[in-house]
Image: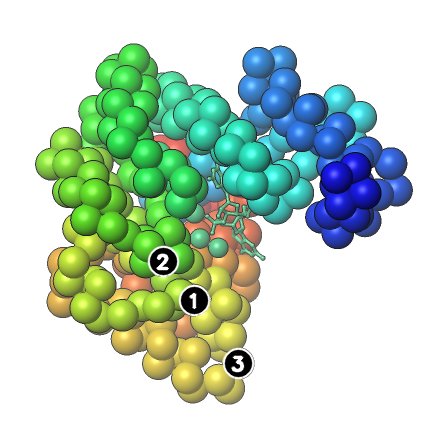
Amino acid sequence: AAKAAGKSAYRTCTPALRESAVSRAELIADLRRAVDEDQLRLEFQPIVDLATGVVRSAEALVRWRHPRLGMLPPAKFLPLAEETGLILPIDRWVIHEACRAAATWRDRAPDATVAVNISAAHLRRPDLIATVTAASAGAGLAPRALTLELTESALIEGTDAVLDRLGQLRELGIGIAIDDFGTGYSSLSYLHRIPATELKIDRSFVARLGTDDDRAYATVEMVTRLAGAFDLAVVAEGVETECQHAAVIAIGCPRGQGYLYGRPDGPDTVGQNRP
Ligand code: C2E
Ligand code: MG
Ligand code: MG
Ligand code: MG
């Protein structure tokens, strides 16, 4: 068993982790302490209303300030967190922190919203609703100020129980965004079933705008129209260049997110104008 564990440790170790000789087992032990020892951080990335340049919303993105490895991005620890179930306390911490931050935005931007990523594991849990309502109530944040971002792959496993849960969240006024839209199944029938309020166009399509890739342009245009027809909000993710910005505007996509408008950073971005 030790041998098997050693092998899988090697397989799942990223180069940085291997160099610093932190084993998978150690990293799991570290991750178990991360929430209690206050090592997680949230950054907020602005989501811009393209017509006005105003930031009325931001996405909360988690980072782990590891005591020896420094600041780790989600890709370095969320897969491990998902495998071990530690994603649940992490997700819970993120939801609470995001609600607390968003409650401070109201003075500057009364209709501000915060977007929080929710793992597939969490979506399968009946207590998701209790977690979310406790967090928003505890922070004094209206449920409509909160949007949960779910990926297509998390949604596709959608059992009836999951669909029920999404319906209940909607009834509470909480927004449901489909993240990285276009990279999963994007089936039209499932768009009819899922009570989504928003589509986030994956940045792989946005990245190819402004090149001579007509298909990328057509894809972003199609999703924007589809969202309009379904009465869903829509955000172009990963806008990095003025050229992509111009294309997103020409297509008529109402909101954008990306390094051009702002990198993930402190919570004060909301209520400001696009820099
Ligand atoms: P996502 O939800 O699609 O978040 C957007 C990711 O794209 C973020 O990476 C963000 O920093 C990055 N990004 C934003 N604009 C640009 C751009 O213009 N160019 C490029 N190249 N990248 C851009 P990050 O923070 O590393 O997060 C990666 C993924 O990890 C997220 O993808 C999300 O799926 C997951 N994640 C992040 N925070 C949480 C969390 O608190 N809970 C859960 N369950 N998942 C999270
Ligand atoms: Mg997201
Ligand atoms: Mg995304
Ligand atoms: Mg993404």
Whether residue 205 is visible to the viewer of this picture, yes or no, is yes
- In the image, residue 188 sits, relative to residue 72, either above or below, namely below
- Please identify the residue farthest to the left as the structure is shown: 171
Q: Which residue is mark 1?
A: 183
Helix, strand or loop at mark 2? helix
Give the numbered dot on residue 167: none
Q: Nearer the viewer, residue 227 or 178?
A: 178
- Front tag of 2 and 3: 2
Q: Is residue 45 left or right of residue 32?
A: left
Residue 154 in the image: state x and y as whole percent.
37, 51
- Give the residue type at disc 3: Thr
Q: Nearer the viewer, residue 233 or 157?
A: 157
For image coordinates 79% across by 37% down, the residue present is 2
Among numbered discs 1 and 2, the one appearing first in the sequence: 2
User: What separation in Å lies between label 2 and label 3 (alpha carbons)?
Assistant: 27 Å
Among numbered discs 1 and 3, the one appearing first in the sequence: 1
Give the numbered dot on residue 152: 2
Disc 3 crowd rating (10 Å Cα; few below 14, some 14-19, many 20+) is few
- Give the residue type at disc 2: Glu
Q: Which residue is mark 3?
A: 211
For image coordinates 54% across by 52% down, the residue present is 259
- In the image, residue 90 sits, relative to residue 49, either above or below, namely above
Circles 1 and 2 in contact, beta carbons < 8 Å: yes
> Where, by quadrant of the figure, is residue 58 drawn?
top left
Among numbered discs 2 and 3, the one appearing first in the sequence: 2
Disc 2 crowd rating (10 Å Cα; few below 14, some 14-19, many 20+) is many
Helix, strand or loop at mark 1? loop
Q: Is mark 1 within 8 Å of ligand 4?
A: yes
> Where, by quadrant of the figure, is residue 100 drawn?
top left
Residue 162 in the image: state x and y as whole percent.
24, 44
Whether residue 117 is visible to the viewer of this picture, yes or no, is no
- Give the residue type at disc 1: Thr
